[in-house]
Image (cartoon, rainbow, N blue to C red):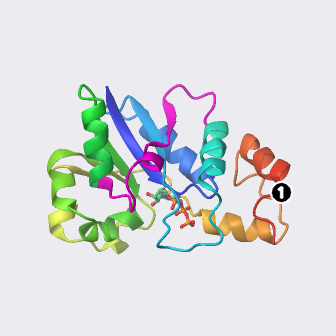
Amino acid sequence: MKIGLFFGTFNPIHVGHLIIANYMAQHPDIDQVWLVVTPHNPHKEKSTLLADYLRLDMVRDAIYDCPQLKVSDIEFHLAKPNYTISTLTHLQEKYPNDEFSLLLGADNLRSFQKWYNWEQILAHHKLYVYPRIAAAELNVSDELSKHPNIELVKDVPILGISASFVRTQLAAGKDCSFLLTDPVVKFIADRRLYQK
Ligand code: ATP
């Protein structure tokens, strides 16, 4: 099976994430998308980051009826800090018959060459990059933009939504019904999350 890994903090998971995951799950070279919840990094204190298991449960609620979307807590059980290459190596050993690719927003491609062992990632895995900014502003090296293992996804809507924006709105007591799906709105309301 061909699996697209979509790493994120999902703090919270918003419609942008779900639109991207759902779109990529229908790509001819992807059978399933796994939303890999990134655990809290003890070296990066971030008070706004919800506990790992809350974010995991929230993602699970968000994708509950989509057979092509799965949630993964794989990084909760791996050594910290989490390097993508280690997670990929671990998954490839655990599922030798599956093929793993990465899905990321274009903002992440800009810093990709700073990732630990990025050359190794690119040598063995395909990267699908969903636009977050206009391609003209992306400003990545030719080495990346022309690399055969990188596909810049084209002709899709650019989604101007971020989890930070959603958190700010929620903290201000604003209604986020159309930025989040109903199960996520309920999950957050039931637990009074992201309030000031
Ligand atoms: P925050 O605002 O807290 O930084 P975020 O909305 O960027 O969060 P993450 O969980 O950090 O969400 O993102 C997970 C992945 O989803 C990343 O690869 C990111 O680039 C991508 N992503 C998130 N929102 C969008 C968007 N609106 N358009 C394109 N890619 C996105």
Q: As rendered, which of 61 and 54 lies closer to the eye? A: 54
Could you say where residue 135 lies in the image, as x and y percent from the top left? 35, 66
Tell me the residue that label 1 is attached to.
Answer: 192
Could you say where residue 84 lies in the image, as x and y percent from the top left? 32, 54
Residue at x 28% of width, y 29% of height: 98
Q: As rendered, which of 36 and 109 lies closer to the eye? A: 36
Apparent side of residue 148 relative to residue 97 in the rendered image (left or right): left
Let me know if residue 70 appears in the view: yes
- The part of the image, by quadrant, that contains residue 18 is top right
Residue at x 40% of width, y 59% of height: 80
Residue at x 49% of width, y 73% of height: 44
Image: 120 above or below 22: below
Q: As rendered, which of 49 and 123 lies closer to the eye? A: 49
Disc 1 crowd, CA 10 A, few/some/many (<14, 14-19, 20+): few
Under mark 1, the amino acid is Arg
Let me know if residue 146 appears in the view: no
Apparent side of residue 185 relative to residue 104 in the rendered image (left or right): right
Residue at x 32% of width, y 70% of height: 110
Q: Quadrant of the C terminus?
A: bottom right
Q: Is mark 1 within 8 Å of ligand 1?
A: no
- Does the magenta portion include 74? yes
SS at circle 1 = loop
Could you say where residue 63 lies in the image, as x and y percent from the top left? 60, 36
- The part of the image, by quadrant, that contains residue 48 is bottom right
Image: 84 above or below 43: above
- Does the magenta portion include 143? no
Q: How many marks?
A: 1
Tell me which segment is drawn in magenta: 63-84
Could you say where residue 111 lies in the image, as x and y percent from the top left? 32, 71
